[in-house]
Structure formats: C-alpha cells, structure tokens
Image (spheres, grey):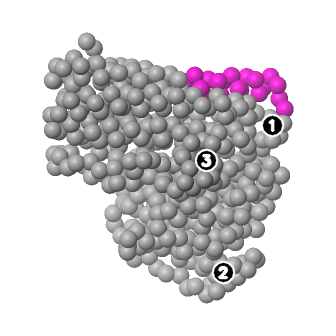
C-alpha cells in the first residue's frame, strides 16, 4: 500500500472505481459496451469520454452494460493515465427518465410513501444528519475542504490542489459517504475555478479532482458541479445534536468566502426547505384523497399546503436578517456560478482525464429545489416554453429519487381536473388559496433577487471596495442579467410567477 505525504494509506488510482453498499449491493461498476447508444436531449452528454469504460457516459444508466476491466493495483496513481482508452465517440444521449413511461394506471393506484423517494416526514428533501467526515484515506480532500475560505482569499487553493494526491473512490461506502464526497469535491471545484474571480477563471479542472468527482457523480446520478442538493440539502449539522432544527442551532459543514452571509444564505434556504415539509406530506394526502374520493381529507390537505407555502415565504424573509446584499453579490455569488450559459466560461470546463472536450453545467439555483417542482405538478401549473424547458432541465440536477417523486406526482390523478369536475366551491377556493400562496412566494422571491442582485450590483459598482472576494473588490459582471443557473433571471422569474397566477381556477 502506498503512503501519502501525511502518512495515511493512499488508495489505488481512481480507475479502481467506487465500491459502496446499499444493503448488500455494490454500486454500478460496469459500462455500456462500445460507448453509449444513440439518443437525444441529455444535459450531461460529453462527446469524448476518456473514462467511458468506467461508468456510463451520462449521469444515469445507458442500458447496455459490459464488465469494466480492472487495473493493476501496483501501478499506483499512474495507472489511470496508462490505461486510459482511446476516446470513444459519446454522442448526445437521452437521459433515462426517473420513472419509466406507461399508462400510469397501476402506478398511480399504489399508495405513495415518502421513504420510497428518500424523503422523511421530519426533514422532507433534506439529507438526514449528513456525514461530516470521510474515511481516513480521504484526509487530503477533507483538509483542503475545511480550509477553503482561507485558501481562496490567500490565493493558495490552486497550488494546494496541484499538490493533492490522486485518490481512488473505491473506499467510499453507501450513499451518505458518496453525498459527502460529492459535496467536498464540488466545493473544491468551485473554489479552484473562481479563486481569482471571473477574469481569472480557469478552463481546466485537474485530473485529481475531475476524475473522482466524475465517478462519484455517476454513482449518485448528479452532475459534476455544486448543486442545490449539495450546498443546502447535504451541507448542514446541528451544533447540539439533540437540539432543534433552528438557525441558532445550525451550522454548515463546509464554506467558501462570504463568512456569516454565506452561512446565513445556506441555512435560511435550508429553513425554507424545512418549512415545506408539511406541504410535501399534504401532496401525499391530496393524491390519496383524490383516489379515495375523500373530499374532506382533500380540503384539509389543500389548507395545509397553502399554510406550508406561506411558512416558506416567512422563512425566506429571514434572508434580510442574515445575508448582506453586497457581500452576496460581490463575494458569494460567483462561487455558485456554473459554466453553462456563462460568458466568463463560454466554452465550458474541461474535466481532465474524463473528456477531451469542455463540458457545460449550470450552477446551483433555487430552480433545482424539488419542492416547488412538486407543488407545480400537483397544482397543474403550466409554464411557458422557455421557462418550462429550463425548469425541466433543472430536474437533472436533483438526486434521482427526488426527481422520481416529482414524476410520480405528475403522473398522479389531476387535482385540477378533480376540482373542476366535482363543482365543490369550497374545494375550488382551497385550491386557489394554494395557487395564490405560490404566486406570493414567487413574487417575494423576485423582491429578494432584486435586492440581492440588481440593487446590490448597482451599489457594488458605485462603491467599489475589497470585500474579501476573489476579484479583490471588483464585482463580477458576467452574470449581471442571469441567475447562477444561467437563466435570464428577471424575465424567467416573472414568467414563472405569471404562469403560476394563470393556474387559478376562475369562479
């Protein structure tokens, strides 16, 4: 066994792959024979995949599998470079949907269970009690991740990453360790890219980060970039393990430049997710009530849904108390930005050792939160072509079980049609209160974005100064009119809000 500079065992090279246990099963260790089959429409389809013989070329299974060759262990960290296959063509592919298509009759008749979608009655989409430490072989990753704010502001992160050993993902066990590894590597990635601001952004992610991030992403079904599922759902801990899930008792596991404002941004967003939990349970109750023709239970579920959305707005309002707008705009926002539809990285990012051509992925965005997608599907909200396409693409950035939940709600009996057909004025009013609460939430979100992006941008440009950000006080400009996910932010948000309002059922 090789030893790292710090004396801990160094695993064999990355191409040994990930081993994990979900029950007694190992994670996938096979790949499509001869590259991926033809298809269309994938967000995650690289055209030239150098590790295509390790995992599917997509984030999701391609369906045609062959055994993956094992690499000799005695080659150490040079084995990957020596065994990289000739880059196979990896054409644009169609990602496998979260649930298979069908008429939905049998599927919608089965009772919904939150546990089937990795959801909990207490935490909803939040990852329950996320791990904060990886096994000892991953000490080099953890040391860098825990020191990211200081390494970035002192301009030392890139040199530290270049010194980091090439670690294998084979020692990761189960989805909790995989989620933590994805969180660690995606945080390091964002810091590495944006350490010197948008003008100093790099276009190549080194192999010692890119390959393990890609492998972990394949195992989880997530893209190789920091997502909402990482930043918020899996990046929290209780200060007092027995204490409440309140901001005073919460902290983040990892951070980036931005100090208390970044901590507040993450934890307030977490509280919005927590406030949604009764609404998630109300979705289940409403679908069951429609199937059972139980109007009383349906009315109660809609009342609880409207209240939950209102509580989400209240939680979102705490952003004003914990996040400085100028710090968010000048320091934090760039580290949440991706490399799709971003003028600062127009060609995307080259994942060294993974693909020969740059890949483009959207940054973390509120549009990646599963909560609002599920509410939209239950209420039958129909968004416009552009906004709807963007929102559907954002579902590819959700953990697959959460994406499957949204699809399951979409395939359930139509709440809107049920309310229209039954002619119950009380149900119609309850339905419209839910839609109205969702409109109010989205209007409030627009107001928040106006304060933290548009107004903050004007103030940062009028009063330049060093806020400790990567660009030494120079505010970023590439995404002035866009969100971190790459959408044209205000036209998108207003379109989504207005199409939500159109979902009201007229009297």
- Please tell me whether residue 145 belongs to the stretch shown in magenta: no
Foreground label between 2 and 3: 3
Give the magenta part as a residue range.
446-465
Task: State the residue lying farthest toward the front.
Answer: 242
Mark 3 lies on a secondary structure that is strand
**Mark 1 and mark 3: Cα distance apart in space:** 25 Å
Q: Which residue is found at the position 56% from the left and 50% from the top?
A: 243
Q: Which residue is found at the position 84% from the left and 32% from the top?
A: 465
Q: Which quarter of the image is occupied by the C terminus?
A: top left
Foreground label between 1 and 3: 3
In this view, 440 is above or below 298: above
Classify 10 Å Cα crowding around label 3: few (below 14), some (14-19), many (20 and above). Answer: many
**Mark 2 and mark 1: Cα distance apart in space:** 40 Å
Q: Which residue is found at the position 65% from the left and 39% from the top?
A: 264
Residue 170 seen in the current view: yes
Looking at marks 1 and 3 on the same chain, the residue that comes earlier in the sequence is marked by 3
Q: Which quarter of the image is occupied by the N terminus?
A: bottom right
Rendering coords of residue 150 (x, y %): 79, 53
Q: Which residue is mark 1?
A: 467
Q: Which residue is mark 3?
A: 250
Mark 1 lies on a secondary structure that is loop
Rendering coords of residue 192 (x, y %): 71, 54
In this view, 226 is above or below 315: below
Mark 2 lies on a secondary structure that is strand
User: 185 or 282: nearer the eye?
Assistant: 282
Q: Which residue is mark 2?
A: 9
Residue 396 seen in the current view: no
Looking at marks 2 and 1 on the same chain, the residue that comes earlier in the sequence is marked by 2
Rendering coords of residue 254 (x, y %): 65, 53
């Amino acid at each position: 066994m090789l030893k790292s500079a710090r004396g801990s065992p160094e695993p064999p090279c990355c191409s040994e792959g990930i081993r994990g246990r979900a029950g007694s099963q190992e994670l996938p260790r096979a790949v499509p024979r001869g590259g991926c089959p033809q298809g269309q429409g994938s967000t995650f389809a690289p055209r030239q995949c150098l590790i295509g013989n390790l995992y599917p070329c997509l984030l999701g299974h391609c369906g045609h599998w062959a055994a993956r060759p094992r690499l000799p262990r005695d080659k150490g960290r040079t084995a990957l470079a020596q065994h990289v296959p000739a880059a196979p063509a990896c054409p644009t592919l169609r990602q496998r949907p979260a649930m298979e298509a069908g008429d939905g009759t049998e599927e919608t008749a089965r009772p919904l269970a939150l546990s089937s979608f990795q959801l909990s009655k207490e935490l909803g989409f939040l990852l329950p009690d996320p791990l904060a430490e990886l096994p000892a072989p991953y000490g080099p990753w953890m040391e860098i991740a825990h020191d990211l704010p200081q390494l970035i502001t002192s301009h030392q992160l890139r040199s530290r990453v270049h010194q980091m050993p090439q670690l294998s993902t084979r020692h990761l066990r189960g989805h909790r360790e995989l989620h933590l590894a994805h969180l660690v590597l995606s945080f390091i990635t964002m810091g590495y890219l944006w350490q010197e601001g948008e003008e100093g952004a790099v276009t190549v992610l080194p192999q010692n980060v890119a390959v393990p991030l890609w492998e972990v992403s394949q195992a989880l079904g997530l893209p190789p970039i920091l997502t909402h599922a990482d930043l918020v759902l899996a990046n929290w801990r209780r200060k007092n393990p027995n204490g409440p899930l309140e901001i005073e008792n919460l902290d983040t596991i990892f951070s980036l430049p931005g100090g208390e404002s970044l901590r507040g941004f993450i934890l307030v967003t977490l509280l919005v997710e927590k406030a949604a939990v009764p609404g998630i349970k109300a979705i289940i109750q409403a679908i069951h009530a429609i199937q059972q023709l139980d109007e009383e239970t349906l009315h109660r579920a809609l009342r609880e849904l409207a209240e939950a959305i209102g509580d989400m707005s209240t939680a979102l309002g705490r952003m004003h108390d914990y996040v400085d707008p100028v710090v968010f705009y000048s320091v934090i926002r760039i580290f949440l930005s991706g490399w799709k539809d971003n003028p600062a990285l127009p060609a995307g990012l080259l994942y060294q050792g993974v693909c020969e051509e740059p890949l483009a992925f959207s940054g973390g965005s509120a549009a990646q939160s599963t909560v609002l997608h599920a509410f939209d599907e239950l209420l039958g909200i129909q968004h416009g072509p552009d906004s709807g396409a963007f929102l559907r693409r954002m579902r590819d950035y959700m953990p697959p079980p959460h994406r499957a939940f949204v699809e399951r709600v979409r395939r359930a009996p139509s709440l809107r049609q049920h309310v229209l057909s039954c002619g119950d004025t009380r149900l119609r009013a309850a339905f419209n209160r839910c839609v109205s609460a969702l409109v109010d939430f989205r209007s409030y979100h627009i107001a928040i974005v106006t304060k933290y992006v548009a107004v903050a941008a004007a103030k940062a440009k009028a009063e330049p100064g060093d806020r400790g950000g990567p660009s030494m006080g120079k505010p970023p400009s590439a995404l002035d009119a866009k969100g971190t996910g790459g959408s044209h932010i205000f036209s998108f948000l207003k379109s989504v809000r207005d199409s939500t309002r159109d979902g009201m059922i007229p009297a």
